[in-house]
Each structure stands twice: as C-alpha cells, then as structure tokens.
Amino acid sequence: LDNASGSLLNHFNVYYVYVVSLFLFFCIVMTMIPAIAKRKLGDANTQPEFSNFSWFSMMFGAGMGIGLMVFSTAEPLWHFGKNPEIISGEIEPYTDEAVRFAFRYAFLHYGFHPWGIYVVTGLALAYFAHRYHLPLTIRSALVPLLGKHLNGFVGHLLDITAIIATLLGIAVTIGYGIKQLIAGMSEITGSEWMIMAPGIDTAPEATRSALLVALLVVMSLSIVSAATGVGRGIKLLSNLNLGLSCLLLLVFSLFGPLVFLLDLYGRACIDYLLVLPAMSVEVFESDTAKGQWQEQGTILYWAWWIAFAPFVGLFLARISKGRTIREFILGAMLAPAAMCFIWITLLGGTAIYLELSGVADKRIIEAPMSAQLFETLSVLLSSHWFNGFAQFVSTLTVVLILTFLITSADSGILVLNTIMTGGGYHAGLKHKVIWGLILSAMIAGLLISGGGSLEAMQKAMIIGALPFSIVMLLMCLALAKDFVCGGFSRSASTE
C-alpha cells in the first residue's frame, strides 16, 4: 500500500487537483442554466419524501458528521502551525498572522469542493433513477453513454468500483471517529487500558484492544439501525445528531470568545471566496515541502471525498426524489458548506483563541488529534459553573460522536446493499448483516495491519478513489449528453 500510494501521488497529484475543481465548476454551471436547473428529480407531480429539516440532517450526517467532530478542531490547528505560507517563511506559525491562512485552507478542504464531489455523483444517480425510473445504482448514471452494454461485465465493473471506494471511504471515516470516541471515553472514565503511554517522540494513542472493542460496539449498533431502514432508525439518529450538534455549538457560542468568533467567521468566509479560484488550481511540486504538505492535506482530502462519493451520492439520491436540480445542488452544497464553516470556526476558532491568549499553554496544540476537541472543552469549561461541567459536556460530545459513527456506518451498509441489489430499496436482513460484518472485518484488518494507526486505511483509500474519479467524469458527460441531446429511450436503455 505504501509503495502503490506513493507512486500514485507522484503521478496523479495534479490530476486530483484539477478534476475536483472541474466537478465544482460543473455544479455551478448547472445551477446557472434555467432549462436545466428547473428540472425535477422525478416526475412532474413528484413531491419530496422528507421534510427540509430531515433531508438536511440526513445529508449532513452522512456527508460530514463524524469527520467534523474530529477535524473542526484539528484541521485549523494543523494549518495554524503548518501551511504553505509558513513553509515558505512568509509568516510565523502559531501567531495572529497565521490565523487567516489556517482557516483559508480549512475552509478549502471542507467547503464547496467536497460537496461539489458529492453533488455530481448524487445528481447523476438521482436524475436517471427518479426521472427515467431506472434502478438506483451506479451503472444507471452512465446509460446515455453505454446503454444496454451496462447489463453485462461493464456494468458489474462500475458497481464493483463504487463498492470498493465506498468500503474504503467509510473505513477511514469510522477509523478517525473511533479513535476520537476512545479519546473521549478515556477523558470521561479515566480508564488507562484505552490509551497507550506516550513515547519520547510519540503522543498517546488508543490501544489496539480499545480500537477493536469500540469497533465492535459501533458496528453492532449500526447493523441494528440499518435493519430498521431509512424511514426509522437512520432518520431518527440523523435528527438526534443535528439536535446534539446544535447543543454543542451552543456551548461554544455561550462560553467561547463569541465576538472573536463572529469576526473570524465573517473575515474567513470573505477571504475563502476571494481566493477560491486561485486555490482551486494551485499545485505544488511533489518533491518540495509545500508539495508534501499538499499530498498530506489537499490531495488526501480530495481522494477521501471521492472515495466517499458513491456512498454519500447514492444516499443523497435516495432521499432527494422530488427536488429540482437547482434545489438539490444548492441544498446539498451551499447549506452544508456553510454549516461546516460554522463548526470549524466555533470549535477550531475557540481552540486557536485559547492558544493565542496563553490560556491553553499549548495543551491543545500538543494533544493528539483525536483528543484536541476534548482538550479544548476542558480548558474552556473548567472554570465555569461547577467542576463537573466540562465532563458533562464531554459526555454529551461522546454520545454525539457515537451517534455520528452509527449514522455513517448504517448509511454505508444501506448504500452497499442498494448497489448490490441493483438499486433495490429493501434489501433482506441477512444482506445487511453480511455487509455490516464485511465492513467491520475490513476496518479491523486495516487497523491491525497499520498497528492501530490509520495510515494503511488512508493509503488504500487514495488508491481506491482513483478509478471512481474516472467514473465521476463519465457521469458528468452522461448528464451533459442528456441535457444537450434530450432524453434517451427508456425501452432502449432497459433492453
């Protein structure tokens, strides 16, 4: 995995940068053409199945939920100490001047680009499945290009490519979430067996036994939730996620430096929009320090979002029947991106403020990535109300992490079964259990082979994402062909 991913990054880092920017540009163009933007994902009289609140909460929970719990604090803190401007010596790390660039790159990695990736996949699937009544599976999105040939080997290959990418994308996401869950449980309970003692040059990390026990609990609950379907278990958990998320954000708003955060949010959003075109096509030489930073950050994220695209895209398509193309794109790109910016500003901005003011005294910066959120809560709340208040909020945060993990995993199981049943909405219980066990075994195997780290998962994901990025390019061509040339013959497409 190490050799393969290293070779791939050396040859395809430029490709990843440009192809992801192309997906975002494609989404923007579709919203600007009225004849396209007003088309419905379904028949003319089709109404949305879910309310806007449930639609948004399920979309947000599947697309970014657990990732934000980990990286809302860790991402800006990383760029606070290391970004291209710091590497080139233009500014000093961990200073006031570094704040603007920290959030510029954090917003880049969690803004319009990742949601543009999800929208391209989700729109292609939803458009051909709901408008032309084709099975909700990956091969249906390429019917205008390949027609009846998708019934054979080519169609199977496309779906298998999506399954591999989905498995790897979910594995990395759950891996990060489980490590944070263990960090939170250790913070609350003080259990020493969950965390290894730090070495001379290493930070404390979760033990292998803690990782496997946490994985067993999360995946068992996920299989139970998936068995109840979208309308019950997944919908209930997604609504709970959004409610607990709002509660956590309220805590940071009430006890954090609100004036600093509001000013930071406004300035960071404006700065992001102003430099977005330039950042979208910025490529550094792979053999330089900036190139290594880009591979560890931007390229890894783009591969992660592409690997996650069949999962999130198919899930978005499943819950978006009856929406217009413009409503789908704006709802699935602008609103979640704005929510991501709020998360990153409140959590990451608070952590940076505590470090800049000297209150944290590098406790947050030097903490392991999975523990930085809990360290921020501890520093922020230790002097408020009563001694146990920080622990109470940390407990709620652990519950939120657990529900986000379950939502990500059960949605992934649902998507895998949807692909494997040829677009069927109601897979049998045994299939949900089997794919839940397969996903659990793969995550456990990659965790063990990586010695408890996520490096093996990340490298496998970078490799698995490349083939599906080509499928996504074909999806754009299929949509463009249908928009320009008109609808294809349904009878011909299903022969």
Image: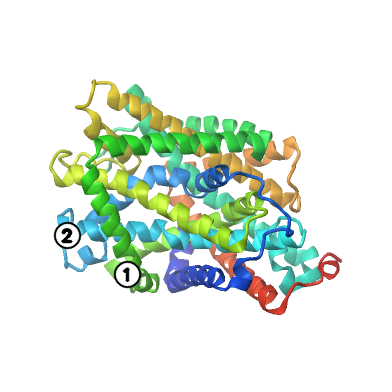
Q: Is residue 310 above or below residue 214?
A: below
Q: Residue 439's spot in the image, x, y percent? A: 60, 43
Q: Residue 388's spot in the image, x, y percent? A: 28, 21
Element assignment for label 2: helix
Question: Between 449 and 481, which is closer to the camera in this rendering?
Answer: 481
Q: Is residue 386 above or below residue 286?
A: above
Looking at the picture, the colour scheme in use is: rainbow
Identify the residue at horizontal 62%, vertical 70% (top origin).
36
Identify the residue under disc 2.
97
The C terminus - image quarter? bottom right
Identify the residue at horizontal 60%, vertical 61% (top origin).
121
Q: Is the residue marked by circle 2 packed among few (<14), some (14-19), or many (20+) residues within 10 Å?
A: some
Q: Residue 200: which quarter of the image?
A: top left
* Cα–Cα span, label 1 and label 2: 17 Å
Res 136 visible: yes
Mark 1 or 2 closer to N-term? 2
Q: Residue 467's spot in the image, x, y percent? A: 58, 65
Relative horizontal placement of residue 488, taking residue 111 as reference (left or right): right
User: Of tags 1 and 2, which is closer to the observer?
Assistant: 1
